[in-house]
Amino acid sequence: MSQSWNGTAVRLAFDVMFKRQWLAIPHVTVTDIRYINFCELKKAGCRAVVYDKDNCITNPYEDHISLRVKPGWDECLRVFGRENVLIMSNSAGSSDDKDFEKARHLDNVLGVQVVKHGGKKPGGHDAILQALGGKDVKLEELAFVGDRLLTDVVFGNLGGMLTIHTQPFSLKRDNRVAKSVRTMENALMLPFFRWLRHNRYRGALNERVQTHPLLSGAGLTRTEPLE
C-alpha cells in the first residue's frame, strides 16, 4: 500500500519551520525501540504506548515486526499489555486504507489494535483515545514512538504526548518521498531546531520541549539494546 498526498502535514510543516519549531523536537531520541526502558516508562506514569508502523516496528510496507526490534516490541507488550499498545499509521487505518481492510489484517497479524482514524497524521488524536476503549486516559499519559519529525513527533507534541524519536532501520521498499523528507528532517531540521532552542529561543521554547510529566522517570532509555 502506497501513501497518498498528506496536505495537512505539508501545511503544518510550514508553520513548524517558521513559527512553532518546538513541535518537531522530540522529548527522547533513540536508535530504535530496543533502547527504550519500558519498565521505567510505565513507572513514570505512562499508561499506553502508540507506535508508528513503517521503519519503526516493521520494514516499510511489511506486516511483521522486524527481527531487529522484536526484543523491544516483546518487552513493551510484556510491560504494558497488548490492550495498551496501539499502532497509528499513515497507511493502515488511514484514508488510504479502503474499509480499513489493511488495519483489520494487521490487528490479527500483530496482535494489537491498529487505530482506525480515517485521516492522516498529524490529525487523529481523538481516535487514539477511542481505541483505548473510553478509558479514563489523557493524551499526556501516552507515549508516541515514530521515525518521522513532521508527522510522528509533531503529532505527538500537538496532543501533549511524550514523543520518542527513532531512526529508520530499513530503506528497502521505502517510499521515495518519505525517504527524502526524513533525511532532510534528521540531517538539517532537527539539528537546526535544537540549535535554536539552545541559542536563540531558550525561554518558552525550552519550557515546551523539556517539560513533560513522563520525563520525571529515571532512565527512560538504555545505553545498550535489549537482545
Image: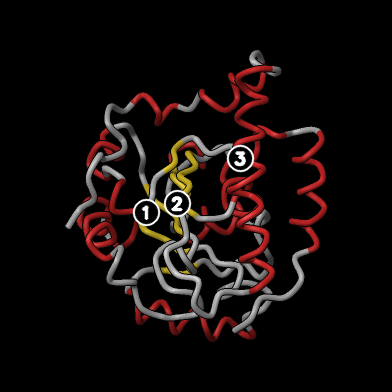
Q: Nearer the viewer, residue 55 or 46?
A: 55
Q: Nearer the viewer, residue 157 or 139?
A: 157
Residue wearing tag 1: 32
Circle 1 crowding by C-alpha within 10 Å: few under 14, some 14–19, many from 20:
many
Q: CA distance from mark 3 to mark 2?
A: 13 Å
Residue wearing tag 2: 166
Residue for point 67% across, 78% down:
96
Q: Secondary structure at mark 1?
A: loop
Q: Is residue 211 left or right of residue 204?
A: left
Whether the residues at callouts 1 and 2 have beta carbons within 8 Å, the answer is yes
Q: Secondary structure at mark 2?
A: loop
The amino acid pointed to by label 2 is: Thr
Q: CA distance from mark 3 to mark 1?
A: 17 Å
Q: CA distance from mark 1 to mark 2?
A: 5 Å
Residue wearing tag 3: 190
Q: Quadrant of residue 28?
A: top left
